[in-house]
Amino acid sequence: MDASEFRRRGKEMVDYVADYMEGIEGRQVYPDVEPGYLRPLIPTTAPQEPDTFEDIINDVEKIIMPGVTHWHSPYFFAYFPTASSYPSMLADMLCGAIGCIGFSWAASPACTELETVMMDWLGKMLQLPEAFLAGNAGEGGGVIQGSASEATLVALLAARTKVTRRLQAASPGLTQAAIMEKLVAYSSDQAHSSVERAGLIGGVKLKAIPSDGKFAMRASALQEALERDKAAGLIPFFVVATLGTTSCCSFDNLLEVGPICIKEDVWLHIDAAYAGSAFICPEFRPLLNGVEFADSFNFNPHKWLLVNFDCSAMWVKKRTDLTGAFKLDPVYLKHSHQDSGLITDYRHWQLPLGRRFRSLKMWFVFRMYGIKGLQAYIRKGSNKLTKALLERINNAKKIHLVPCHLRDKFVLRFAICSRTVESAHVQLAWEHIRGLATELLKAEKE
């Protein structure tokens, strides 16, 4: 494929993608296939001679699409949302074209510097404390990880290194093995399984703190566990607080847990993988109060902020906590600017060496939506749209609703009023509302 054919096929692919996105509601959300369905549909070996692009695209529809779970379908309600937007897809194309492997500043200066600035942009949207921002000379800063699972593991390993060095400095004869067998990490019993997995990979004990009646980790339960383990000769070193748990979106009590972590000198990592995107809205930002006590904070723009996978945002108060744990400088990765104090080599902030130019996706999305556009997306519509929807509902006269105001939000009330109402009536009403809402949103876009 030469540049001329690439131009032609690229335009065709953009049309195919746009058609897919626009028509996704018509596709069955979950595939009707059995394990192993695909192997009989394709040859057992790669072709000796080239296939045509047309044949490949035809096979996408015949072979691939029947086995796709359509995550962006309006009927997909499983797992968690995965972000997508046209600006992000376009940025991903450019990322693939540039093709840099941005492990160091020298490997592609723009790749490193744009990431640093984008993480500051996003941190300011969240009103993170200044300590988490890189700025011109800050001690903290942000990094794009592949997933929240990676961020938790990186934080745990950094915390493990930090406490090991501290204890060995105080007792030079203490071996790493002797320390490792006593280290204990903690999280709520509602924390994501990736936290437990981080403990397994990190080779440390992880203890689940019983959550309260609202499925939140509270100070009393954490303090009790810490005291019990210290009395048994163990070394607490790491706590994960979850903001928006997987099961029910509960929030651990940061304002209680944070001061305990400061007092006990243990690393506090905040996992807000899904819910964190909402904190760009001032009305939801109080849910992040207590982040000032944390050593590291992570959430996934690729879940709810229109930046497609993978893009997991992680900040640390002290970048040396990460670089101190992962820094190695073989000769073939050295470059003339690395000791200038002016640059970041992100290979020291993560598990892999290589990394994609992922900050392009953030740059495109943040600029093409603006903060107000992103906030409107999180809020899922304005008062104006809600009022227009109510007008359409009541003009159609199939069902009848009345509104209310919750502070400054115009809200539609759905009350079950009649003695004879059954679930079928509610379902029909919901389908009617959803259809009118879809028409309204399409009209807005046009």
Image: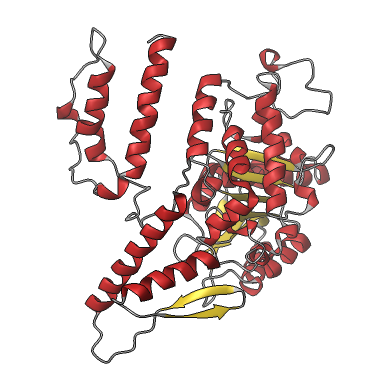
Q: Which of 444 and 133 is in front in this view?
A: 444
How far across and how far down the image is residue 405, in percent? 56, 79
Task: Reply above or below: 143 against 41.
Answer: below
How far across and how far down the image is residue 116, in percent? 71, 36
Task: Reply above or below: 94 against 20.
Answer: above
How far across and how far down the image is residue 18, in percent? 37, 37
Q: Nearer the viewer, residue 71 or 377?
A: 377
How far across and how far down the image is residue 350, in percent? 62, 35
Left or right of 366 on screen, residue 387: left
The answer to which quarter of the image holds residue 366 is: top right
What residue sits 25% from the left and 33% below the top? 64
Q: Which residue lies furthest to the front in this view?
A: 395
What residue sits 69% from the left and 70% below the top? 256
Left or right of 430 on screen, residue 365: right
What residue sits 22% from the left and 39% below the top? 66
Q: In which quarter of the image is the N terminus?
A: top left
